[in-house]
Image (cartoon, helix red, strand yellow):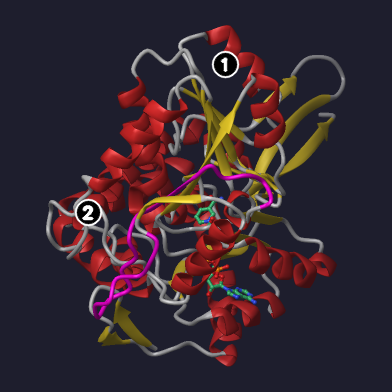
Amino acid sequence: MKIKNPATDTIIAELKEDNISEVNTTLEILRKGQKKWALLQVKERLNCIIKFGDLIQQNKEELAAIMTSETGKPLQQSLNEITGAQNRVDHLKANAEKWLADEILVDAGATHEKIVYEPLGVIANISAWNFPYNVGYNVFLYALVAGNSVLYKPSEYASLTGKQFEKYLYQAGIPQDVFICAIGDGSLGQQLLESDFDGYFFTGSHATGQKIAKTVAPKLVPLQLELGGKDPLFVTDDVPDVQLAAANAAEGAFYNNGQSCCAVERIYVSEIIYDAFVEAFVKEVNSYVQGDPTNLNTFLGPLTREPQIAILEHQISDALEKGAVLKAGGQAIDVAGYYFQPTVLVDCNHDMKVMHEESFGPIIGIQKVKTDEEAIALMQDTKYGLTAAIFTSNEERAMSVLQQMNTGTVYWNCCDRVSPNVPWSGRKNSGLGTTLSSQGIRAFVQPKSYHMRA
Ligand code: NAD
């Protein structure tokens, strides 16, 4: 597999791809390894994960440079992601033993009852490239602590990073027959679906997730899908500082070039502050430093995937034909890498694709609204259900809007964030199942009920 640097459109590495016969051999190796791994105490497995977290933090400069070289993520954002992902390790350190302990429910009388949480077995983790540390950790760290072995298939756009996970997990004491990183693109992913894993954990697009669900359904094994979003933000007329609201909204939309599953993808603004908001928003976007992602001052690097450029161009021309006004950007930049100007479309409406289809790039549509009811209806006019956000100084108003959102996560005066303390889950086309929190570890175990008479 040839690995390209999206900032320069040049090949920077070549990796050997795994093939189907290797997948089946690998599955057998992992099956044997899992049996021994599951016999360890949670504490012993956790110690390896804690060591892994330490090693990653000790080597984060080198690891950030690797991630930036294959994804184009600005170096500062690569460092932020690696530093931030440690919160998953800390969260497991604080909670895993408690969450995985047997639950004694009845220990008096004739029949005693308890729940034991057993690992699923060997799981396949097919992952995405946009936040390889965050979305990778959400699955493989929790799966390993729970006693599973893992076949990890990184995205073809984050394979060098995937190999680093393998290297440091081994250094941290995870046996080589308990975690294996398999290199390949979607066709290898497809082959994994044809093998007999005990669970499939996928992060990626809705289209691929739906294909995976159809293929895996007859196996009747656990399937989790963390998919895309079209996440709305409503900015009300009572925000105390319109410029600050605009700056925060812009960061939610453009961080990592908009290539975040929970990026703000559409903004509804109260008509009372609409003009002031748009002016401040465009000023903020025009202040972003775009260019070489290895420069620590860069906020916008190249897109990771070249084909996304055509999708963005199509959404922009569709919006302009239907009456949107272009306030910033609008096109790809004519240089070697996959650079796209940060683009702001205003006076949008729901006939436009930019308000319905995931953009996954540095473009945003802004629409004026008259009332909270109108905003709620527009926010809910979507096939997706990942997150929804509101900026308002009125808590009651915020809660009244947020409780009407059919999404896994809602934000009041914040957006585009994930925390290990609370579940991460999508509804509708945004996915199935939960990672993070106590519920995220329960995804990797199966309860066994004991009814016991001495
Ligand atoms: P993608 O669907 O193109 O690829 C994801 C993974 O699936 C890759 O490893 C790929 O090789 C593999 N794959 C492709 N075709 C396959 C097939 N037929 N069978 C099995 N595997 C196959 O997605 P992507 O471009 O890597 O990621 C971007 C998408 O992921 C966006 O939609 C984004 O919103 C979503 N995402 C969601 C979350 C979340 O937590 N909800 C997090 C990150 C990204």
> Tag 2, which secondary structure?
helix
> Tag 1, which secondary structure?
helix
Residue at 54 percent of width and 71 percent of height: 30
The magenta stretch is 330-351
Q: Is residue 100 above or below residue 64?
A: above
Residue at 76 percent of width and 68 percent of height: 216
How far from the left and from the top, in percent, is residue 261?
51, 51
User: To which quarter of the image does residue 173 belong?
Assistant: bottom left
In this picture, residue 199 sits left or right of residue 292: right
The residue that mark 2 highlights is: 55
Residue at 42 percent of width and 49 percent of height: 45
How far from the left and from the top, in percent, is residue 156?
44, 76
Q: Which mark is residue 398?
A: 1
Residue at 70 percent of width and 22 percent of height: 373
Q: Is residue 195 above or below residue 242?
A: below
Type of amino acid under label 1 = Ala
Type of amino acid under label 2 = Leu
Observer-nearest of 172 and 385:
385
Q: Which mark is residue 279?
A: none
Q: Residues at badges 2 and 1 in contact (C-beta under 8 Å)?
A: no
In this picture, residue 14 sits left or right of residue 97: left
Where in the image, quadrant-wise, is ligand 1 located? Answer: bottom right
User: To which quarter of the image does residue 427 belong?
Assistant: top right
Crowding near the residue tagged with mark 2, few <14, some 14–19, many ≥20 C-alpha atoms within 10 Å: some
Is residue 423 visible to the viewer in this orientation of the structure?
A: no
Q: Verify whether residue 341 appears in magenta.
A: yes
In this picture, residue 349 sits left or right of residue 146: right
Q: Quadrant of the N terminus?
A: bottom left
Is residue 312 visible to the viewer in this orientation of the structure?
A: yes
Observer-nearest of 23 and 83:
83
